[in-house]
Image: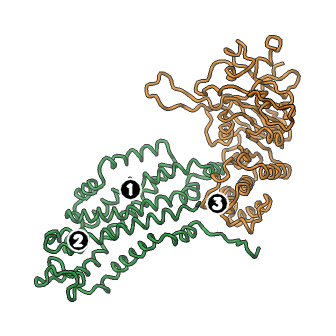
Chain colours: A orange, B green
């Protein structure tokens, strides 16, 4: 039973309707050239994002997890076109992004906003909170007065009293408050898709919970769709409807959140899950979940990229790179592992 | 609006800087000294005790504190105090004008090079690297010599000397700022590069470049004095500190204190500019 996620169905009848995925990403690829040796025989590339394909349904949250350096953030920046991809297509609610007859880049960017990890670096230190939030809408033709009224309303909505915060500067705010401002800034565009790139990772636990709850409320209130990038599996489980696991620039597993957390099929996902600190003493283990480091993303090895750390590695894994395929009868749970395709041989 | 302990109005960045500057005594003293020098220069025609061009063979090289001549007279018997006040006009102009024009041109080029990056950056920066091949004194003398002596030519020469230095600072600060998330967030708005530079980059680049340029004021004054000393700047009998230093050279053994006076004023002004720049630099560090 092979269902290729590489060719997500574009439902033309339902363009713009509820069944049409909000964002479809197809074969997104970015190799960064490595500078250095002047007389190198061949040019080296960091395979940052390699043939990443996925789709996000409307009103859902897709969690993207993986260890640092696996290409999560690069994927986010490629989607936002902050970096230009080498190849790959995106379809936003049935319209091709930045292609003839599709949605143009400026309009696409209004529909998609991003909240970054570093709440301080993502606010201009010379602008007041109100100016920061109002900047986006004015770019899209909203009058200054209108934009600042909207900004104050948004501040109120994210839990910051406008009369206290509107004319303050970022350095006068705490981390949690700044991240609320960043959320308000993103929402000012009235986007449909919000990329949360480690948006709560830098906050302490109690503030993190408040911000996550705010995000959940805003999602239902404004019919938002989230791409939730994180390395914190607890948070991902709490926030997401679907989870996508990335390893070294590739998608290794994707499926509904409960399915991934209970029946992870990829050895890498299993290792990640076993690393979650548990409150239950019986579930604790002293065994390190994974050994070694990920291989160098500069010209990675042939075959499965997880081969040198995989506890169940077989000969095939060293030569043939596995394709994403459905796990058994679960069509929406896909994994890229030889073990999945041929459980009898590999067991 | 709320009332009570929380103030709803917050201080702007430059207000905070000004408030912190009040805790920098050296910078404040320097600012005061500069104020006095600038006022003395601007109002020289009304404040000066004598005519700066009126020579007297009988009163040559009178010592400091002579009757009627507070700071003595020069080799042609002209009142030193008057000539130092008038000289401040040209010397300060030569200090401030080239740095200001280089600041405007250099910041623009640096912002473009830093923000656009890639090929634009390479063209701008490599071109300016050519200027770096020469020591700044030599470059100023060479350009000034090629253009010919005169006030405006030495202003142009000094401006050209400072542009590459300011572009370098502006470019490196812009490159740093450009990588920050708030620029990425602004780019996600779909705004034009011009709008992003104006709203988000300029304000964050101007500060450090401004401080650097303040430090250049003293260099500019000294270089201008050097040009005048070599006969490439202002022509006699116009009073200018560098030129006065040159013409009083012959008196260095007979009346060393008089001969040193213009030099002392150059030193005083440049050290005041430098200390003020230092003070502003530390006051601008508002995250402490």
| Depicted B262 relative to depicted B73: above or below | above
Q: In the displayed structure, does residue A256 sit left or right of residue A82?
A: right
Q: Nearer the viewer, residue A210 or A73?
A: A210
Q: Closer to us: mark 3 or mark 2? A: 2
The tag on residue A194 is none
Which quarter of the picture shows residue B154? bottom left
Are dots 3 and 2 on a single chain?
Answer: no
Q: Residue furthest right?
A: A329
Give the SS element for disc 1. Answer: helix
Q: Quadrant of residue A22?
A: top right
Q: Chain of mark 2?
A: B
Q: Is any atom of residue A7 visible in this view? A: no
Q: Are marks 3 and 2 in contact (CB under 8 Å)?
A: no
Q: Do the numbered discs 1 and 2 sit on residues whose CB atoms are within 8 Å? A: no
x and y, in percent, of residue B256 in the image: 18, 72
The x and y percentages for residue A63 are 78, 38
- The label on residue A171 is 3
What is the distance, in whole Å, between disc 1 and disc 3 at their CAs? 33 Å
Looking at the rendered image, the quarter that the C terminus of chain B falls into is bottom right
Q: How many marks?
A: 3
* Secondary structure type for disc 2: helix
Neighbours of disc 3 within 10 Å: few (<14), some (14-19), many (20+): some
Q: Is residue B206 left or right of residue B96?
A: right
Q: Is residue A167 visible?
A: yes
- Residue that label 1 marks: B163
Mark 2 sits on what residue?
B260
Name the front one of labels 1 and 2. 2
Distance between the Cα atoms at labels 3 and 2? 49 Å
> Where residue A205 appears, x then y in whole percent?
78, 49
> Residue furthest toward the left?
B58
- Crowd tier of the residue under label 2, counting other residues whose Cα lies within 10 Å: few below 14, some 14–19, many 20 or above: some
């Amino acid at each position: 039973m092979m269902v290729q996620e590489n060719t997500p169905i574009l439902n033309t009848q339902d363009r713009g309707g509820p069944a049409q995925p909000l964002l479809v990403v197809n074969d997104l690829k970015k190799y960064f050239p490595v500078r250095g040796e002047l007389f190198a025989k061949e040019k080296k590339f960091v395979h940052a994002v390699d043939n990443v394909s996925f789709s996000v349904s409307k009103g859902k949250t897709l969690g993207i997890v993986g260890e640092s350096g696996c290409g999560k953030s690069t994927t986010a920046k490629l989607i936002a076109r902050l970096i230009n991809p080498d190849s790959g297509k995106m379809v936003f609610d049935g319209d091709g992004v930045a292609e003839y007859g599709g949605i143009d880049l400026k309009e696409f960017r209004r529909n998609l906003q991003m909240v970054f990890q570093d709440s301080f670096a993502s606010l201009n230190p010379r602008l007041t909170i109100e100016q920061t939030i109002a900047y986006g809408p004015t770019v899209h033709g909203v009058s200054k007065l209108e934009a600042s009224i909207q900004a104050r309303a948004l501040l109120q909505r994210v839990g910051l009293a406008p009369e206290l915060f509107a004319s303050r500067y970022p350095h006068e705010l705490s981390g949690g408050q700044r991240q609320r401002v960043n959320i308000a800034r993103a929402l000012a565009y009235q986007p449909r898709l919000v990329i949360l790139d480690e948006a709560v990772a830098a906050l302490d636990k109690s503030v993190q919970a408040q911000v996550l709850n705010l995000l959940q409320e805003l999602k239902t209130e404004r019919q938002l769709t989230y791409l939730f990038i994180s390395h914190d599996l607890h948070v991902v489980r709490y926030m997401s409807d679907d989870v996508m696991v990335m390893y070294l620039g590739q998608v290794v597993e994707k499926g509904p959140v409960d399915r991934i957390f209970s029946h992870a099929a990829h050895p890498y996902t299993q290792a990640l899950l076993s690393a979650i600190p548990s409150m239950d003493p019986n579930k604790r283990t002293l065994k390190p979940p994974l050994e070694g480091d990920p291989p160098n993303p500069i010209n990675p090895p042939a075959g499965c990229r997880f081969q040198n750390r995989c506890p169940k590695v077989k000969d095939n894994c060293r030569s043939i790179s596995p394709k994403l395929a459905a796990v058994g009868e679960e069509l929406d749970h896909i994994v890229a592992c030889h073990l999945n395709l041929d459980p009898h041989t590999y067991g | 609006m709320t009332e009570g302990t929380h103030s709803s109005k917050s201080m702007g960045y430059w207000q905070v800087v000004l408030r912190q500057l009040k805790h920098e005594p050296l910078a404040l003293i320097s600012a005061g000294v500069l104020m006095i020098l600038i006022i003395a220069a601007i109002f020289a025609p009304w404040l000066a005790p004598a005519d700066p061009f009126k020579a007297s063979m009988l009163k040559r090289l009178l010592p400091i504190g002579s009757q009627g001549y507070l700071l003595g007279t020069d080799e042609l018997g002209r009142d030193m105090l008057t000539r130092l006040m008038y000289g401040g006009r040209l010397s300060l102009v030569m200090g401030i004008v080239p740095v200001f024009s280089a600041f405007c041109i250099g910041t623009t080029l640096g912002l473009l090079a830093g923000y656009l990056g890639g090929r634009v950056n390479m063209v701008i920066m490599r071109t300016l690297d050519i200027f770096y091949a020469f020591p700044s004194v030599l470059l100023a003398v060479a350009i000034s010599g090629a253009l010919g002596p005169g006030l405006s030519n030495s202003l142009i020469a000094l401006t050209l000397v400072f542009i590459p230095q300011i572009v370098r600072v502006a470019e490196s600060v812009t490159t740093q700022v450009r990588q920050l998330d708030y620029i990425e967030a602004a780019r996600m708005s779909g705004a034009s590069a011009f709008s992003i530079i104006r709203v988000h980059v300029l304000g964050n680049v101007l500060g450090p470049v401004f401080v650097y340029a303040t430090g250049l004021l003293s260099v500019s004054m000294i270089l201008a004095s050097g040009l005048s000393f070599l006969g490439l700047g202002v022509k006699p009998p116009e009073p200018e500190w560098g030129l006065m230093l040159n013409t009083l050279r012959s008196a260095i053994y007979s009346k060393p204190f008089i001969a040193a006076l213009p030099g002392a004023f150059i030193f005083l002004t440049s050290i005041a500019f430098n200390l003020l720049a230092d003070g502003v630099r530390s006051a601008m560090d508002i995250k402490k």
